[in-house]
Image (cartoon, rainbow, N blue to C red):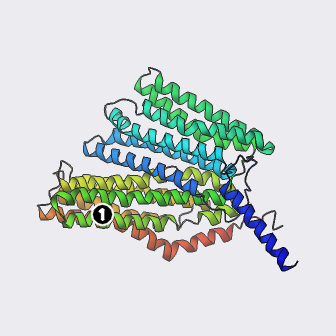
Amino acid sequence: MSEQQAQRREVAQVRSQLRDELRHRLRPMTGRDPDERSRSTTPLELLYDLTYVVAFAKAAEELAHQVELGHVGSALGAYGFAVFAISWAWMNFTWFTSAYGNDDALFRLATIVQMAGVVVLTFGLPLSFEDAAAGESPHNTVMLIGYVVMRVPLIFLWLRAARDDAEHRDTATAYAVVIALAQAGWVAVALLPLPVEVTVALVVAFAAAELAAPVVLERKLGRAPWNAGHVAERFSLLALITLGEVVAATTTAVAAVTSEDGWSAASVVVIASGLLLAAGFWWAYFLIPSRIVLEAYPERTFAWRYAHLPIFGSIAAVGAGLRVAAAAVHGGELSLFDVALALALPVAAVLLTIFVTWSVLMRTYDLSHVPLFLATLVPLGAALVAARVVGGDDPLNLEHGADLAGLVAVAALVALSAVVEVVGHEVVGYRHTAEVVEADPPAPSPSAA
């Protein structure tokens, strides 16, 4: 090939790339390559994720507010409902995008509509928590409208995929039908004058049905062409962005305290523990070799995906705990033990979900990893004991030297748990991960055969 021909060929390739990047005409949804390696997240997907992090942050803010008012049980129920709605809608769209995201104009518009739904749902969160505190259902009309707007575009997208992808038509059609039926069910539950107990039971039943449907569909009708490596990257990036909510919550909470009282030892402790927790969770989460393992064992993606369902909410709840701690520092009726619980419980939930996700991914449930997990809980238990001994049930008062010392100890012990997780895995845990893979090597891919 002459130099001139090579140059023309290179120009043609650049023109083709520019056409794909800059012209978003309608393109057929024939399915992406499920075995494509090094597939990366698109800017549109990242923009989409940002709206969900705002929803997580608002849910965490409302959780903290209700806990400060003493409505702990109802607040946790409303928070669980909100986290399910937000996380499940995100997971469903991410699943579809991995299989059929073609970045054409209609796909972009459908994505933007879903983002608008997230914003609407976020506006409904305060009422949801207030209703739960009053003994009513957290499933209100504003949240319903937002959730339906988040889900209905996906029906249209799955039907497009069914039209264009003959090989997976039955699976795509079934997804569209199931999502449509689910939305009808959510609307009926919200609008019918049912007792609160019946409404809550139906909410749980519909949630369980939505969780089971994808597994049943793909086992019966065949796997949609999602890409395991791309799915792993999408989930890890949302976890990363949600960790930013911990940093934001820390900064916001401390700023509220320092704006009136100035900097103090307590505010320094709160912000230091928040930053250390965010860094520790980031380090610990990315010690799970999700992309490497899922690309080698794509059949594990379903279980790994469901194990992620509580991770995002648990991370955001740490931000709620930090807000509670900052509010208690500013004054109120919360005791040092209440602050310790608000910090320790969500941190324990994050550590537990990381441990479970690792176990599901590696498909090993032996006891060799359990001691490390238990070791991470020791500082949390110590924080609760210290808070009970030092503060009792009296409201936190930092003018008392014992309370200030107790708060410092509690924050340091809670943050230490994340440090134990990271150090333990770096020193010991990674060896076990490698041993598990060596004991069960992946089957060779068709292309390598």
Q: How many marks?
A: 1
Identity of the residue furthest to the top in this view: 193
Mark 1 secondary-structure assignment: helix
Q: Quadrant of the C terminus?
A: bottom right
Under mark 1, the amino acid is: Ala
Residue of label 1: 382
Between 404 and 91, the one nearer to me in the picture:
91
Question: Residue 163: horizontal and vertical position, in percent?
Answer: 76, 39
Question: Residue 236: horizontal and vertical position, in percent?
Answer: 54, 60
Q: Quadrant of the N terminus?
A: bottom right
Question: Residue 65: horizontal and vertical position, in percent?
Answer: 29, 45
Image quarter of residue 164: top right
Residue 375 is at least partly visible in this image: no
Give the side of residue 257 with respect to residue 285, left or right: left
Identity of the residue furthest to the front in this view: 4
Residue 90, above or below 179: below
Who's the residue at 55% across and 52% down the image? 307
Give the side of residue 172 with respect to residue 257, left or right: right
Who's the residue at 34% across and 52% down the image? 320
Residue 136, above or below 374: above
Residue 141, above or below 395: above
Who's the residue at 73% across and 66% down the image? 14
Image quarter of residue 379: bottom left
Give the side of residue 201 with respect to residue 344, left or right: right
Who's the residue at 71% across and 44% down the image? 218
Residue 322 is at least partly visible in this image: yes
Identity of the residue furthest to the right in this view: 1
Question: Residue 31: horizontal and vertical position, in percent?
Answer: 74, 50
Between 351 and 29, the one nearer to me in the picture:
29
Identity of the residue furthest to the bottom in this view: 3
Mark 1 nearby-residue class (10 Å; few <14, some 14–19, many ≥20): some
